[in-house]
Image (spheres, rainbow, N blue to C red):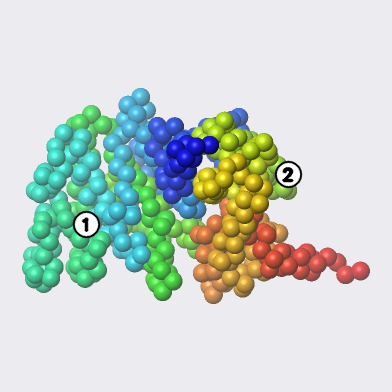
């Protein structure tokens, strides 16, 4: 394979990229083959809940990083936009662009980000320039109200060029963010009423543009995890705003929020959780439809003739090994492909091929602490994600967020270890000890 082709296919395998619905690399995993490899068709399930409902729906959705959640939400938005179906005006809000996901969040941050994105989308639908038109819109009025409510905001340290800049400035300026939160928390009912009234007016404007209704899809909130120093504070802030049915985040329009996967272990109910591609049944026997879907995912990134040049005569056996090591984790499949393409000599020699998986195992060894070995052995044996106590919760959540533990659906949901985690000697020893302890005494 020449340098130009190797570089081309390497860039087709960027594993942090979410794909647009019309991207040729995008595989509709839930629509591929005769059997559902993730339990249900997730876009169809979410889409119907929105399309069929007269009252505004409120949906919580999550998925492990790299499971394809953002790609599926973009597919959902395209479906809802279709005039032959719901003819909605979908508004995708990217939490990474509108919030500081490394610090605690609060209701005003989320509501302001939604209003900002919705107003821009409606102005686009009306054929107006959002940057110019928003100067006299909701955020100009909100900023004026905030300044009238607290004179401190007139000081130079809090000054911002114009109302619509408020969301961006809150994201990057903690002092301003905290000041705005304090003001709004003292007038929360008034703020929420004004925000909901504004969304009702924006939906009416969308309807005058020929759309049936608005749908807000708030993505990337599942990436709220903070740093090692403020992990619990950040996750606790997400738990506070979404707990108890999240009454402050219900809106007069359809809305779907992503939430951190760790919240599921905190007894959150009615959360849709996107699983991995099921490669095997719970008893370990192969599930061929899942293997076929993973193989097609590979083919969408790199065609068969190029794969043969990369992996050599044993191409199909090596692809099967790569898929097995992924555990059905879509991002891992693409990442392993990119690792193969980074090699200087192609096709891959056996030692270079094995090094890809050795590096994968080394990476997981670094994120799995020794005090998690016994619990991981229990997950493998029981196939459930059970948090032992509050002290254990952070370790368990970290194992889930780092994909050391993977979730599948097979009628009911179940969990298993990432193949690289199952190979860690300490985990293997813990599994043997658990098996020995379960045997009846002679």
Would residue 136 be seen by someone viewing this image from the given angle? Answer: yes
Q: Is residue 35 above or below residue 327?
A: above
- Which quadrant of the view contains residue 90? top left
User: In the rendered image, which residue does mark 2 sit on?
Assistant: 285
Q: Residue at point 16% right, 55% down?
A: 165
* Circle 2/circle 1 CB separation < 8 Å: no
Q: Is residue 280 above or below residue 355?
A: above
Q: Is residue 93 above or below residue 225?
A: above
Element class at badge 1:
helix
Query: Callout 2 environment at 10 Å: few (<14), some (14 to 19), or many (20+)?
Result: few
- Which quadrant of the view contains residue 92? top left
Q: Position of residue 32 (x, y in %)?
A: 55, 32
Could you tell whether 224 is left or right of 297 in the image?
left
Q: Between 23 and 397, which is closer to the camera in this rendering?
A: 23
User: In the rendered image, which residue does mark 1 sit on?
Assistant: 167
Q: Residue at point 22% right, 57% down?
A: 168
The quadrant the C terminus occupies is bottom right
Could you tell whether 425 is left or right of 195 in the image?
right
Could you tell whether 389 is left or right of 210 in the image?
right
Would residue 275 be seen by someone viewing this image from the given angle? Answer: no
Could you give the CA–CA distance between mark 2 and mark 1, rounded to whole angstroms? 51 Å
Query: Callout 1 environment at 10 Å: few (<14), some (14 to 19), or many (20+)?
Result: many
How many numbered discs, if any?
2
Element class at badge 2:
loop
Q: Position of residue 67 (x, y in %)?
A: 50, 48
Q: Position of residue 294 (x, y in %)?
A: 58, 39
Q: Is residue 32 above or below residue 336?
A: above
Q: Position of residue 106 (x, y in %)?
A: 31, 63
């Amino acid at each position: 394979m020449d340098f130009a082709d190797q570089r081309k296919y390497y860039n087709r395998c960027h594993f942090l990229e979410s794909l647009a619905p019309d991207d040729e690399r995008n595989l509709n995993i839930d629509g591929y083959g005769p059997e559902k490899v993730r339990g249900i068709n997730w876009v169809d399930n979410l889409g119907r809940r929105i399309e069929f409902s007269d009252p505004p729906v409120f949906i919580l959705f999550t998925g492990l990083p790299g499971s394809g959640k953002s790609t599926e939400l973009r597919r959902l938005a395209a479906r809802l936009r279709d005039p032959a179906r719901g003819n909605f005006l979908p508004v995708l809000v990217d939490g990474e662009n509108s919030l500081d996901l490394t610090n605690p969040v609060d209701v005003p941050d989320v509501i302001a980000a939604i209003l900002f994105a919705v107003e821009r989308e409606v102005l686009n639908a009306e054929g107006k320039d959002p940057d110019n038109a928003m100067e006299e819109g909701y955020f100009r009025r909100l900023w004026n109200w905030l300044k009238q409510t607290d004179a401190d905001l007139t000081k130079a340290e809090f000054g911002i060029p114009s109302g619509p800049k408020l969301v961006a400035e809150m994201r990057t300026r903690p002092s301003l963010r905290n000041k705005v939160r304090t003001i709004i928390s003292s007038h929360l009912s008034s703020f929420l009423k004004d925000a909901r009234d504004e969304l009702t007016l924006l939906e009416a404007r969308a309807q005058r543009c020929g759309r049936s209704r608005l749908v807000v899809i708030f993505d990337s909130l599942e990436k709220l995890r903070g740093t090692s120093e403020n992990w619990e504070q950040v996750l606790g802030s997400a738990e506070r705003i979404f707990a108890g049915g999240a009454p402050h985040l219900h809106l007069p329009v359809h809305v779907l929020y992503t939430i951190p996967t760790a919240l599921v272990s905190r007894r959150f109910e009615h959360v849709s959780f996107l699983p991995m591609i099921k490669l095997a049944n719970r008893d370990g026997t192969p599930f061929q439809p899942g293997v076929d879907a993973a193989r097609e995912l590979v083919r969408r990134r790199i065609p068969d003739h190029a794969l043969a040049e990369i992996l050599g005569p044993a191409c199909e056996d090596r692809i099967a090994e790569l898929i097995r090591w992924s555990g059905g984790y879509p991002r891992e499949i693409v990442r392993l492909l990119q690792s193969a393409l980074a090699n200087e000599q192609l096709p891959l020699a056996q030692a270079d091929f094995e090094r890809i998986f050795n590096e994968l195992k080394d990476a997981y060894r670094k994120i799995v602490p020794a005090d998690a070995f016994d619990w991981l052995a229990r997950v493998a044996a029981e196939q459930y994600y059970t948090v032992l106590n509050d002290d254990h919760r952070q370790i368990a959540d970290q194992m889930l967020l780092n994909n050391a533990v993977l979730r599948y659906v097979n009628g009911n949901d179940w969990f298993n270890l990432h193949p690289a985690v199952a190979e860690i000697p300490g985990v293997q020893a813990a599994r043997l000890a658990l098996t020995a302890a379960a045997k009846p005494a002679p």
